[in-house]
Amino acid sequence: MFTLLSSLPLSSPALAAISVLGVLILFLLKRLRRYSISYLPAPECPSWLVGNIPEFQRPREAGDADFQWSKKFGLAFRTKGCFGEDILYLADPKKFGIPQAIQYVLNKSGYNFAKTLELRIRQQYSTGYDSIVWAEGEQHAKHRKIMNPAFSYNALKGFVPVFTEHAKKVANAWKDILDKENGNSSILNVPPWLSRTTLDIIGATAFGYNVGALGGSDSEIYKAYYNLYSQTHYNLSNFTILFRRITSFLPPFLVKYLIYLPKKDLKRMGSFTKVIKTLGEKILAEQVALHATSKPEGKDVISILVKANFSEDPKKRMGDHEVVAQFMALLFVIRITAGHETTATTLSWIFYELSKRPDIQACLRNEISETRKKVINRGDTEFSIADMESMPYTAAVMKETLRYRPIVLHLFRRAIRDDVIPLDVPQRTASGNLINEIPISKGQAVTLSVCVYNRLKSIWGEDADEWKPERFLDESFIAKHSYHVGVISDLTLEMQVILMELVENFAFAPASSEPDIKAAVASSVVQPMVRGEEHEGSKVPLSVTLVQ
């Protein structure tokens, strides 16, 4: 059982004050709610102050609590948050393309469900409250409309040479290491290399900036970002969980001052924010000066932001603070957390899984080799997007890894108006009654479980708990689950280019020491770590051999 008092460095009066504040908040929330979800089953709550949150944040393996509770209570139940707040937990599936609970919350209800205050507060002191990740409603729609051209299909075509260039850089760096060690094999810790590669790609594609992460250890951005998530979000104490909940009630203008508090994780985040803010202002100033003289028509992110900064149309214009905030959001939350983190971490898991399955690795390498021959035969030197879209086995490996090893365990939302969430699978209440929908009130917190949904046997088959890329090659599966086979995006394209380059040139096998790799939770982000060496952050040592 989790205990709070042992981990709270607070005096009794301070603890009492927090408790009183929590009671008041809980009372006000309940008074404002029309519907209660108390009829849903729930796991035992070990602490009124922090609820079940520690069980999600400090598992032995990512998703342990999710899998245990979903087996016991079903796909719609209740968990407890701070101060005894009831949180609706959903992993309800969709069958044959019919959206239900999760899809309803994310897509079908428009802006009925916003990001939770806790999440928005963390994003705000990382990016500012003018950014696309902080904005909601009309402001969010405005930001998306302005920035969409930077992520169009035409923009993707221009990214391919950049992705290829940096994939070759990391491949050459590995070859140099193998040459220096006078052999064809070496033990490499894969995640830092992939992290450097994707960070350089972000700088080049989005901002035309040379991050220099692959060039050595002097990159200021890389040093600021390295192991940021594991140092600020891993193994959260009960005090930090409680502190973050309380700060979610602060007005936006106060949030930026949180980084000055004597708290290690806030100071670490603050130093990173300072680095990217300074860089954002520098790049913006350079681009504004360029725009004033030459009016460039670039479709990259920074060109679009500068154009919006100069626009006379209020619907298209972004102020200086908004532009810098978008830069920080794209560099941190969207491209780093969602892009850099997703790509580097997912690739690390792919190589880890491939290292244990030489047969799958050989099939993947064969598909890459055959496609390479077609490219050469038509007189080209590099893969096109069409080439990469014609590689089903490579796509299957990526999709299966994203399913089996999702980078994010949960998505968090809060209802901004009363609503009724439909269920695909009828669920039993605590009293045993079957229900097909859940009425909720404005303010209701909702946790959407990605990890449970991704292991549902009703969706993925009886072997859902296995890493098996072949499931995405099954025509009957694809016909039933076409919504899982989406179009290529900049993130999957980047991932595929790096994967193809490294698998074509190197073979992967488990390190001789066979370290115990665990799926560790840093906030709701999953990272591979070596058990017992978690303080070193993301780590996957593999034996890497040059393919002859």
Image: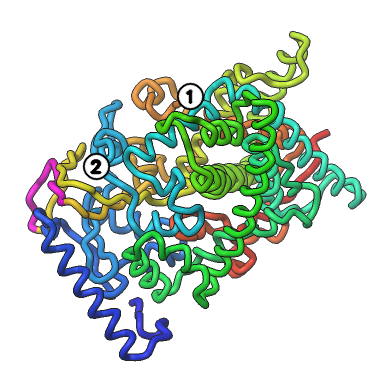
CA gap between label 2 and label 1 equals: 27 Å
Snapshot colouring: rainbow
Q: Are marks 2 and 1 in contact (CB under 8 Å)?
A: no
| Image depth: mark 2 or mark 1 in front | 2
317 in magenta: no
Look at the magenta stretch and give its main secondary structure: strand
Q: Is residue 303 toward the left or the right of residue 260 in the image?
A: right
Q: Earlier in the sequence, mark 2 or mark 1?
A: 2
Q: Secondary structure at mark 1?
A: loop
Marking on residue 112: 2
Query: Observer-nearest residue: 117 or 531?
Result: 117
Query: Observer-nearest residue: 406 or 457?
Result: 406
Residue 385 picture quarter: top right
Q: Three-letter amino acid code at disc 1?
A: Val
Q: Position of residue 519 (x, y in %)?
A: 51, 56
Residue tagged by mark 1?
A: 487
Q: Quadrant of the C terminus?
A: top right
The magenta stretch is: 431-441
Q: Position of residue 66 (x, y in %)?
A: 34, 56
Q: Three-letter amino acid code at disc 2?
A: Asn
Query: Observer-nearest residue: 198 or 530?
Result: 198
Q: Position of residue 306 (x, y in %)?
A: 58, 35
Q: Residue at 64%, 29% (x, y): give it.
A: 363
- Relative to residue 218, is residue 487 depicted above or below? above
**Residue situated furthest top in the rendering:** 378
Q: Residue at 38%, 44% (x, y): give it.
A: 455
Q: Residue at 15%, 69% (x, y): give it.
A: 27
- Relative to residue 535, is residue 437 depicted above or below? above
Q: Quadrant of the N terminus?
A: bottom left
